[in-house]
Every structure is written in C-alpha cells, then in structure tokens.
Image (cartoon, rainbow, N blue to C red):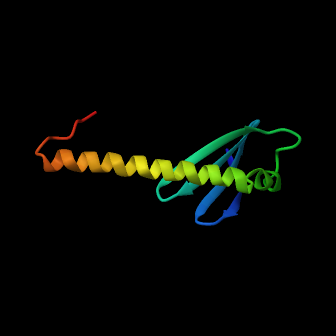
Amino acid sequence: MRIIGYLDRPGMLVTVFKHDNKISVKLELDLMEQIYKLRDDLYLSELREIDSLLDAEWMKEIIANFEAMAHARLDALARYQEKIKGGQEPDIV
C-alpha cells in the first residue's frame, strides 16, 4: 500500500492510499477516523479524481458521521466514569 497524496479539507487530515485495484480514503478528525475503499478504474484512479469525488454533499455526511462517533464516544466514557464512581470495577474484555 502506498500513499498517493493528501487532500485539503478544513480541520481534518485526508490521506489517499493505493493498493492493487483499490483506493482507500482515510479521513481523520479528533482521534477518530473513517476509511472508504473504492475500486481503482479508468475514471477513479488519480488524486484529483478522488478530490472531486469528496464533494460538499459527501463531506456533510462524513462530518455528520464524525459527530455521531464523537457523541457515541462521549456517552461510553460517561457510562464508564459512572461505573468507576459507583465503586464497580470496569468489565475486562
């Protein structure tokens, strides 16, 4: 797998990888990440094409996913802290 480039998106790091017949787009924000895998084909194989694919509408959905992930993380941390405060030992998995 090799990095073919980075895309400029406000507040997040976007790295584009290429491996065999796949392109992976990894978006990172506040210790969270989303990875989208795409087939490499004639119309989607270069960094500029991936940049066009990540349009405003898809970026809105990606940001909404990050917000949902952050909310789920905060809820889980709050539940964990309540267990600790209540004297319960956290479950070890």
Q: In the image as oriented, which residue stretches furthest toward the right?
A: 42
- Which residue does the image show at 41% across and 46% down from the upper left? 72
Residue 23 visible in image:
yes
Of all residues, the one furthest to the left in this rendering is 87
Question: In which quarter of the view is residue 90 placed?
Answer: top left
Q: Residue at x 13, y 41 (%)?
A: 88
State the residue in front, 70 or 46. 70
Looking at the image, residue 76 sits to the left or right of residue 2; the answer is left
Left or right of 78, for residue 86: left
Q: Position of residue 18 (x, y in %)?
A: 72, 45
Residue 3 can be seen in this image: no
User: Is 90 or 82 nearer to us in this picture?
Assistant: 82
Q: Is residue 76 left or right of residue 81?
A: right
Instruction: Tell me what residue is drawn at x 15 percent, y 41 percent.
Output: 89
Quarter of the image with the C terminus is top left
Front position in the image: 32 or 68: 68
Q: What percent of the width, then of the height, locates residue 85?
A: 15, 50
In the displayed structure, would residue 50 be above or below residue 20? below
Residue occupying the point 46% across, 56% down: 31
Placement of the N terminus among the 4 image quadrants = top right
